[in-house]
Image: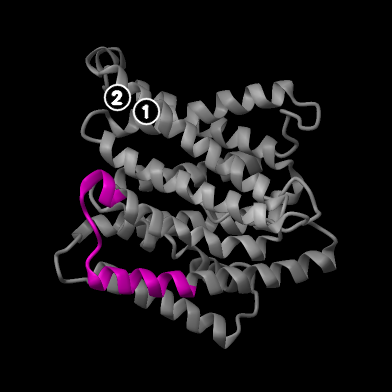
Amino acid sequence: MTGPGSSARHPGLGVLLIVAAAVCFASMDNLTRRLGPLLPVLLILTARYAFQAVVMLVWLGFSRQHRLRTAHPRFQLLRGSLLLATSAMSFWGVQYMPVPEFTAINMLTPVLVTLLAAWLLKESVSPLRWALVFGGFVGALVVMRPGSGLFGWAVLFPLLGACTYASFQVLTSRLAALENPFTTHFWTGAVGTAILLPILAFSGIDVTAVFAAASASTLLWMLVIGFLGTTGHLLLILALGMAPAATLMPFVYVQIGAAALLGWLMFDQLPDFWAWVGMAIVTVCGAASVWLNLRGASARARRADAPVAADTFAD
């Protein structure tokens, strides 16, 4: 998403907002893992997107600066579908993997963006960027340790999520200048909700019975998940209006540390030594890839006189 403003007057505040967004998403993933045994994951995912659609509908209804109507519905449909697929991988994936390890593998997105840019957009990729791509995959392999039986088939969730989100990134980076980011934020929630409601209706889940059996605190935490997802992306939009994306995006890797801390507090689990090593490798390579990708995008945007899109959060 592009920031709502072009001036970068408060980079310190922008960094604080991006860190707060990272904490929101780490909290949402851990809460989703906590609620998974208590509520159907499909219901939690639907509530997360419905919350965003309703909140942004109210926001845009009272706003005089932003509009609800989209000029590019096909872009919104494809973008929303890709982000929904990514979220689905996250919501189900954290049921089978610890959140820190899941987050680290999912953070391969920037290096996958490099691959997609070279393949689909025919962009020139420097040896340094190829080295970062290789390093990022090495870090992911250290986290996953294939053949160890540590996570098994569950690693497909973060890997597929990283692939769908990298596709989302490439699309957004090319087309985000066409829409106001707040309008896009509403349509992301609306598209997700429109896709999920029929699936929920035909899933066989008795929503009325689930609500009747769930405790008030469980239902409240489900709403909190929607709040965290919606607020996290709003914080991201605001942060991008206060500082250059190249300054902010490396700080999204705070999400790995926040996920580990919250996982320890909520589940009394911490990654082992090799998982920390792998996460460190992914963080360094991913943050460097973000910076190089955004530097290149900024140069292209200056030549085209268009804003640059940057959104590294998937949830």
Name the residue beneath numbered marker 1. 222
- The residue type indicated by label 1 comes to Met
Tag 2 near tag 1, CB within 8 Å: yes
- Residue 121: image location, x then y, percent: 64, 68
- Residue 128: image location, x then y, percent: 55, 85
Q: Is the magenta stretch mostly helix, strand or loop?
A: helix
In screen coordinates, is 179 left or right of 314?
Answer: right
Q: 228 or 289, which lies in front?
A: 228
- Residue 260: image location, x then y, percent: 33, 56
- The residue type indicated by label 2 comes to Thr
Q: Give the range drawn in magenta.
A: 263-285
Q: Is mark 1 on a helix, strand or loop?
A: helix
* 268 in the magenta segment: yes
Looking at the rendered structure, which numbered label has been put on residue 218?
2
Compared with residue 43, is residue 311 higher up or lower down, i.e. above or below? below
Q: Residue at x 26, y 12 (%)?
A: 212
Compared with residue 18, is residue 38 higher up or lower down, i.e. above or below? above
Q: Which residue is drawn at 46% across and 59% down?
A: 254
